Image (tube, coloured by chain):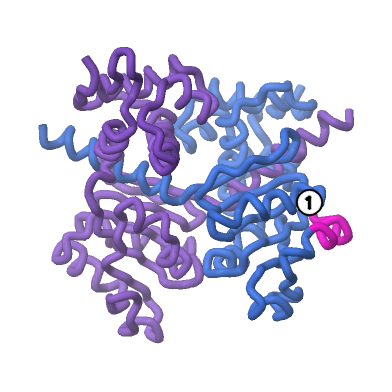
Chain colours: A purple, B blue
Amino acid sequence: MGHRRKPPSAEVPKATATRISLYLRYLQGREAVGAPTTSSQQLGEALGVTAAQVRKDLGYFGQFGFPGVGYKISHLIPEMKKILGTDRTWQVALVGIGNLGSALVEYRGFERQGFHFTAFFDNNPQLIGSRLNDYTIQDIEAIVEVVPRENIELGVIAVPAGAAQGVADRLVDAGILGIFNFAPVVLSVPVGVGYVSIDLAVQLEQLSFFVTHQHQETVE
Amino acid sequence: MGHRRKPPSAEVPKATATRISLYLRYLQGREAVGAPTTSSQQLGEALGVTAAQVRKDLGYFGQFGFPGVGYKISHLIPEMKKILGTDRTWQVALVGIGNLGSALVEYRGFERQGFHFTAFFDNNPQLIGSRLNDYTIQDIEAIVEVVPRENIELGVIAVPAGAAQGVADRLVDAGILGIFNFAPVVLSVPVGVGYVSIDLAVQLEQLSFFVTHQHQETVE
């Protein structure tokens, strides 16, 4: 019978974890238009994978289907959130309040998924002490003290490349559980600390790669 | 014998294309410290893949090694750039000059890899007509006219989710070759138009997924 969640098998592929996020987005879209149920087939079509792949992805975490019904959307959404760890809120520190940092603060997608910026740090004396949302921007030096005191679990790094490793080290010393890095540099963090990095230029290169080879295929 | 480039086999895996970007980053770092050569072994270690995977990745595009020498960094860097389409410059339009858009303009990683913002669009009357770098911010309505006239090939979308598909449609109508989407929504673009999308909240969810399950593993 449906709807049993289990601890994930040790080795969940990264692609599966990403698809869980995308299944959740699709389910939220379906819920918004009042759909009561969905199927592996539909979920697969939405993401461009097979129904078998959908069942395999979900199978890492339990049995969520109901025989003859498929997936109940109102049940599957909270289950996907539990898997992703977004059935709760996260206290997030943002380090680097430049243009990118400011953009991240205003980016509504984070708040909507339960990520709350509750501490801000910068090394610019002109910014330190000023208010952002309901918080005071603090000196980067204060990270080690503030992060454990305020129970901050995740850190977002939006500082220039040259400053990023130093910031990561401070966050790690402060006991941070995970780091989301926007600086265009590979950071070294200890095993056991979560690490996700986005290099925007790499992504743009992927676009030029596609366009270049698409073009070649068309022309030659 | 080394150093023969060929048109890529039709089916280059996405992961390979991403790794070509990361090989290039590694090579540029090695070049900066004056290293003359590298090996599949070293490239693999830098990215956490096997030497065999490195050879397979590069093998899609040609033969780049020299027997007894390995890869000459000064040769391999331009070859990787040719593969990625960054041996040239790209004219890029940015649509949406809010916080995120402004952050992207200042993000130096784009310029460094040859992506130049040469047109800016917004629908905010207070922004239209003002200057950004050496360009005037123009009305979104002008996309269809400006993009072909200015030979703009790529478009970056940094508008709210609700406006993104309309912007994508205009860019496509204008003959854009590729779209880089930051709006947290899946856009529909015709086959043949490049499409790369970053949903920042999905990435942050991947971090909470990791931290959640890491935590479970440690505790249970």
Q: Residue drawn at (77%, 45%), measured in percent from left and top? A: B177
Examine the rendered structure and indicate whether residue A193 appears above or below residue B162. Answer: above
Across and down, in percent, residue B101 comes to 59, 65
Predominant SS along the magenta part: helix
Residue A95, above or below A63: below
Residue under numbered circle 1: B153
Q: Nearer the viewer, residue B104 or B197?
A: B197
Magenta segment: does it hold A193?
no
Relative to B52, A195 lies left or right: left
Image coordinates of residue B174 in percent, x first then y, are: 81, 52
The residue at 28%/76% (across/down) is A134
Q: Which residue is found at the position 55% from the left and 67% from the top?
A: B103
Task: Identify which residue is drawn at 55% across, 31% down.
Answer: B15
Q: What amino acid type should be assigned to the residue bearing mark 1?
A: Glu
Give x and y (percent) for residue A169. Answer: 30, 58
Q: Which quarter of the figure is the N terminus of chain B placed in?
A: top right
Assess disc 1: are there few (<14), some (14-19) or many (≥20) residues with their C-alpha within 10 Å of its C-alpha.
Answer: many
Q: Is residue A159 visible?
A: no
Quadrant for residue B22, please give it.
top right
Q: State the count of labels.
A: 1
Q: Nearer the viewer, residue B102 or A68?
A: A68
Q: Tell me the quadrant of the picture where the C terminus of chain B can be found.
A: top left
Magenta stretch bounds? B144-153
Q: Position of residue B64 (x, y in %)?
A: 71, 29
Q: Is residue A97 left or right of residue B37?
A: left
Chain under disc 1: B
